[in-house]
Amino acid sequence: MIAGVERRVEHDDGAIEDELWNWLDPLEAALCQGRCVICIALWQSIAPVALLPFHLSLALPDVLRGLPLNTEFGIVPFGRRTRSLVQEFRYEVGAAHLRRREARYARYNEERAHPKDFLHADWESRLDQHPEIARKSLAGTSFLAVEAVGGGDGVASSASRKVLGRIASRKNCYQPRVLVPLAAALPGKRRASWPQLIFSLH
């Protein structure tokens, strides 16, 4: 367990919560050492690891000091089970916003911010104008757009974000996203660079 970190994942059953916390130590090692870390779970399903990009952005934004608040992630592979998991309603909007604000404050106060840590996610910028939304619990895919990337040229197609996509600012904000694989390229879509982190769910 990472020293000094309190477990604060409220919306999962115990099995999913335990699975997610098991991945934090190897992820921290990968960040600190700047290299790939291979984790093996013999004969066990590791589907909950697909929630890590969402948890690290919304539930535990400052649990890993080496991870920028606006990190872009990739999930490989991304099948029906994974999609169903990340579409479950488990993150309260107001609580997620508060945690990200606390993380920014802590990083500023302790002088350990990464570049663009203080750039707000697009869904945060207008949240004070919609107090009714702050009390809602939404799926992670409402906060982070899921973009399908396919072909050798890296074209991407972005899925809509329910609820938060409607209030998201289009100016001077960061659009959080998770990249997932697509079998074939999508003509006419914008190109995307691959993310800093890719979780293999094989």
Image: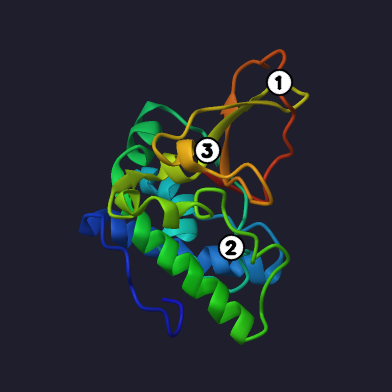
Q: How far is disc 1 from disc 2 in space, using C-alphas? A: 29 Å
- Which dot, 1 or 2, sits closer to the camera? 2
How far, Cα to Cα, is label 2 from label 3?
16 Å
Residue beneath the point at 48% across and 59% down: 56
As drawn, the residue found furthest toward the front would be 129
Q: Secondary structure at mark 2?
A: loop
Give yes or no for contact between labels 1 and 3 (Cβ–Cβ under 8 Å).
Answer: no
Q: Is residue 28 left or right of residue 52?
A: right
Could you tell whether 138 is left or right of 104 in the image? Answer: left
User: Cβ–Cβ below 8 Å for labels 2 and 3?
Assistant: no
Query: Residue under circle 1?
Result: 151
Q: Residue at x 33, y 53 (%)?
A: 91
The structure residue drawn at horizontal position 36% and vertical position 47%, both measured from the top left corner, is 48
Q: Tell me where residue 110 sits by quadrant.
A: bottom right
- Residue 164 found in image quarter: top left
Within-10-Å neighbours for mark 2: few <14, some 14–19, many 20+: many
Where does label 3 land, which residue?
145
- The vertical placement of 153 against 56, above or below, is above
The residue that disc 2 covers is 69
The number of numbered badges drawn on the structure is 3
- Which numbered disc, 1 or 3, marks the residue that appears first in the sequence? 3
